[in-house]
Image (cartoon, rainbow, N blue to C red):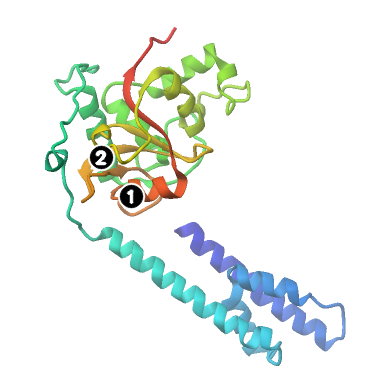
Amino acid sequence: MKGLVFYFLIINIITFFLFGYDKRKSVKHAYRISEKALLVFSIGGGCFGGLLAMKLFRHKTQKKTFSIGLPVLCILFVLGIISYSILDFLCLLPEKSYTAKDFGIEVVKSDIDYNQNGIDDYTDILLGAKMEANRNPKYKSTYYAGGYAPLSEGVCTDVVIRSLLNAGYSLKDMIDQDIKENVELYPRVENHPDPNIDFRRVKNLKVFFDRMVESHTLSLSKIDDWQPGDIVIFGKDYTHIGIVSDKRNENGVPYLIHNAGQPNKEENSLERWAKWKTITGHYRFRLVKELS
């Protein structure tokens, strides 16, 4: 959000000065900035700066493209901001959720307790994801020496990494080892492994999960096969990832625990993401073969 505010501030300042510069050049009958360029900056979000410059410098006021177009653009941007704010607010409102029991679905438990804490792996992964949702880290995509982001920050892959750590699994160690031994299988690595970032890339996780972990249905109509703690990947280019919640909506489709910069990290959005990006991976964390 801060990045978006910064963008609009900068583009409006630039647009304001472009209009002012063009006015100065017009007075001197010098080479002008094209109207197309002024419109591009205005449509790109600088309409407020452009409108202010029009009024202040009395420039382009006789051109209907600007005298009508810029106020309309400003209104549309304001309406867009209001709509976004309303949607943001609605996402924060509590809504009725259901559980597997409400649909006669048996919750699958793992017969493995990898970290020997008395809680099965699938439940541990779910609890780790819920802790991440409650922590509500700021969405920040950057490179960290050592690989791990601070708990106050993260991206979608960090939700999965931290959820598995709660069950005792170091996804970093497993992926680093598999990349070292099978680097040709990881196109995102491009034959130059970097342990500081490789395990935080969805495309690399997709390769690892496809090879090493139990796969399940991609169809949301089979609601009984979507279990708490499952891992889901979205997009034909594998651009997003999250953990399946134990909460379900009125259709029996589980909630999604993920980080895309949204206010609620555990939300009723699995169906929406499935329609928007399509589901391209669904896994239950049980290794189907040992790492060599």
Q: Which disc is residue 72 wearing?
A: none
| Quarter of the image where the C terminus is located | top left
Inspect the image, locate mark 1, and give the three-letter code of the amino acid beneath it: Ser
Image position of 254 with respect to 85: above or below: above
- State whether residue 201 appears in this view: no
Q: Report the front residue among 281 and 144.
A: 281
Mark with earlier residue (1, 2): 2
x and y percent of residue 121 in the render? 23, 23
SS type, badge 2: strand
Tell me, yes or no, if residue 31 can be seen here. Answer: yes
Relative vertical location of residue 120 with respect to residue 19 in this rendering, above or below = above
Residue 179's x, y, as percent?
A: 52, 18
**What's the residue at 38%, 11% (across, down)?**
289
Q: Secondary structure at mark 1?
A: loop
The part of the image, by quadrant, that contains residue 192 is top right
The residue closer to the viewer here, 196 or 284, is 284
For the N terminus, give its image quadrant: bottom left
Amino acid carrying label 2: it is Ser
* Along the line of sight, the residue nearer the viewer: 235 or 83: 235
Rendered image: mark on residue 245? 2
Q: Is residue 232 left or right of residue 63?
A: left
